[in-house]
Image (cartoon, rainbow, N blue to C red):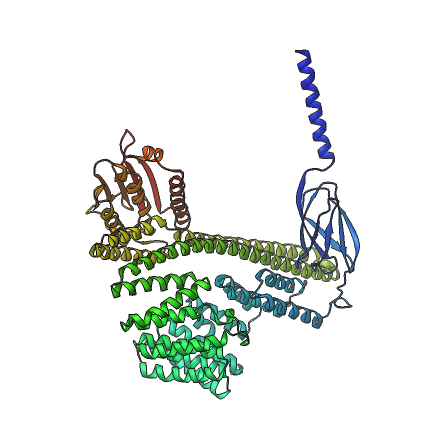
Amino acid sequence: MKNLIFYISICFLLGAFTSHSQIQNGSLRFNLKGRVEAKNTGRPISGVSISNNMGNLVVTNGLGEFEIRTRIGDVLIIEHENIETLQYNVKQNDDVLILVEDFETSSISTRLKSSPDISIEHQALLDSAETYKAHDIEESIDYVAQSISILGKRGRKKELARSLSKLGEIYQYHKQLDLAIDNYEDALDANKTIATSLLLAKAYNLTSRFKETANLLNPLLEIKSIPPYQSVQLYELLGDAKKGDGKISEAIQLYNKGLLIANKNQITSKMTDLNSKIADTYSLSNQTIEAEAYYGNSLELATQQAPKRALQEKEKVADFYNAKNRYSEEITMRKNSLQDLKKLNSPNAGVTKLELGDTITSQRINYKIANAYISQDKYNEAIPFLERSIVEAGSEDDLVVQKDATRKLSEVYKEKGDFTKALDTYQSYVALVDSLYVRKEQEISRANRFNREIASAQNRLTGLEQERELSQSKYNLALTEQELVKESNARQQWIIYSLIFGLLLTLLAAFFFYRSNQQQKLANNLLALKSLRSQMNPHFIFNALNSVNNFISKSDERSANRYLSDFSTLMRSVLENSEEDFIPLEKELQQLELYMKLEHSRFEDKFDYKIIVDEQVQISMYQIPPMLLQPYIENAIWHGLRYRETKGLLSVYIKENGSKSIAICITDNGIGRKKSASIKTQNQKKQKSKGMGIIKKRVAILNDMYADKVDIEISDLEIDGSGTKVLFILKKEK
């Protein structure tokens, strides 16, 4: 026993010694964040090398920031061609601010102290941001951040406004319109300019905020000295807003005013655009003769410009012919477009696919030509164009067009009576749908990651601007204190005023920070909802398609057509409501009944169903998240009723639950949750978990946004664990 105690003591001492040695040697590593800036100006210094004893090396970014893996006791070596080598002893895991005295850039021999010098450097940084805008958004935003950071402690509202406006352009290019609008508005707050107002108006139009466009631009109509090009843009944007608001005649009047100025000043690009937009507007109001005349003008003008612009306009005119059922003219125009596109895609043309866009491609044009032939019942003529479209889409990895063309080819073979080819082609279509679904999930994941990176960059810039404003406030406070020295009798009073001013600035900064966080939270919630709504369980879709395939294989065309018609009606309704947070309960019940009808047609020997609405319930007074009930109905059928030896019953009962809510009760007499779980495969368990998790996330987000509107409770129907009961408590719309 004594020997055992001795050995335990020795082990304890060795452990303590080892731990102490590790601490002494600083073996606990961590990521140290820091910033390097000039002491006299507060400007960040980029390109500074930071290294340590562990052999790690990092370089500061455009904001002077760095992050290095290190430990307590390490010595950081700070090196740059324009500063003396510095050392910093790491004493604790806190953010580090390294101040450099007498820093001078190598590009300019003297410190950029004068306004002209700063303006030149500021514009150079914005030019760099524009260069990287399309290819590297992170690098582009970094240059904008540098342009803000060099403005120093003084106001420089004009330069700040240009930086914020450029940031808005970057976000708009990458379709981050909400962030673009926020930065345009901040730019206008800093310095009102016509150019920024026009950029903001365009972003408003893209987000269908037409009244805000009118409120912003109408005052500019009173300004007499607007340059001709901006004046044309002004009338064009106002016309776009009126057109978007359904005011056709007013839109045409505004477009014509802009066209008059463009013709007078020979602004060819805008002459083309406005003729095309006037034609579009006439087409919307079914004034075909007028529309065709203006399309002729735009096509003639576009032909005088770059071949790319002419091709774009030809496709637009072809779309017009299609809308008017003038298929022969459409086919001729699109075949002409194919020839032009072939020339533009040649190595010597100097035009990239990025410039042409993803709407003007050979596979899309061939697909549209085929559709025009199909509209004329010329199936034999359509087939070669569909086959060409499929091949080209496959080579360009364009799954959307490949899917649509394959589906259309299957339909053509069916119309011709060649059911073997129709079935083979349809099976190819199903495989493409599967591939496209996987790709869409990947795109959603990439979009989520991209949005997170964008949000992080915006938060960093917001913090930088707040820091700049705080530095400016400190600068103003120092000037005030110098003046207070000369006024000794009022010194105490002025100090109090200064403290109050500083407090108000702090409170204002806190308010803006809180507002920014709330806006970001709302944006994240909306993005999460959009992502979750897009994650509809694919099993029902693929099972439905297999059912159609089964009907076809049995030569039961009537059942296949009837089932496919009901299925397409349900899918159309689901897609129409996919962007809504809530829809009328009546519409949801219609969707639910249609879904239960489809599932009953597949498993009619397994269950019957009924939907009962209490007479006292006014369903028109209630809203519900779309497709909220369907997953539970699906679980009841697939995991409960499907495994019964005898026919079961699925019931949906809606009754009042007090004066401001109703209860929606879904019951089934299936085998129960516990028994169902015991017979599931591992893959099935994962699928349920994912589906129920999506529903819980949706409900949690919606309840957070709309004050606990939906409650869900799941329980066993019988004491022995058989059957399942799902109870929804839905609150009335306030």
From the viewer's perspective, is residue 29 above or below residue 624? above
The x and y percentages for residue 274 are: 43, 80
Identified at 40% across, 71% down, the residue is: 365
Residue placed farthest to the top in the image?
Answer: 1
Q: Examine the image and state in which quarter residue 193 appears.
A: bottom right
Left or right of residue 722: residue 28: right
Give the quadrant of residue 28: top right
Q: Is residue 20 left or right of residue 354?
A: right
Horizontal side, residue 400 vs residue 269: left or right: left
**What residue do we see at 36% from left, 64% from top?**
405
Q: Nearer the viewer, residue 201 or 412?
A: 412
- Taking 596 as reference, is 220 above or below it? below
Residue 500 showing in the rendered view = yes
- Where does the N terminus fall, quadrant-wise? top right
Task: Check the image and name the residue furthest to the bottom.
Answer: 264
Q: Where in the figure is residue 61, as x and y percent of width and height?
A: 66, 57
Asked if residue 233 can be seen in this view, the reply is: no
Q: Nearer the viewer, residue 486 or 659?
A: 659
Q: Position of residue 273 (x, y in %)?
A: 45, 79
Question: Which residue occupies 28% across, 33% down?
Answer: 722
Q: In the rendered picture of this protein, how many numbered marks are placed on residues?
A: 0
Query: Which residue is outermost to the left?
Result: 615
* Residue 607 locus on image (x, y percent): 22, 41
User: Where 218 sits versus 663, above or below?
Assistant: below
- In-front residue for pair 303/150: 303
As drawn, 386 above or below 294:
above
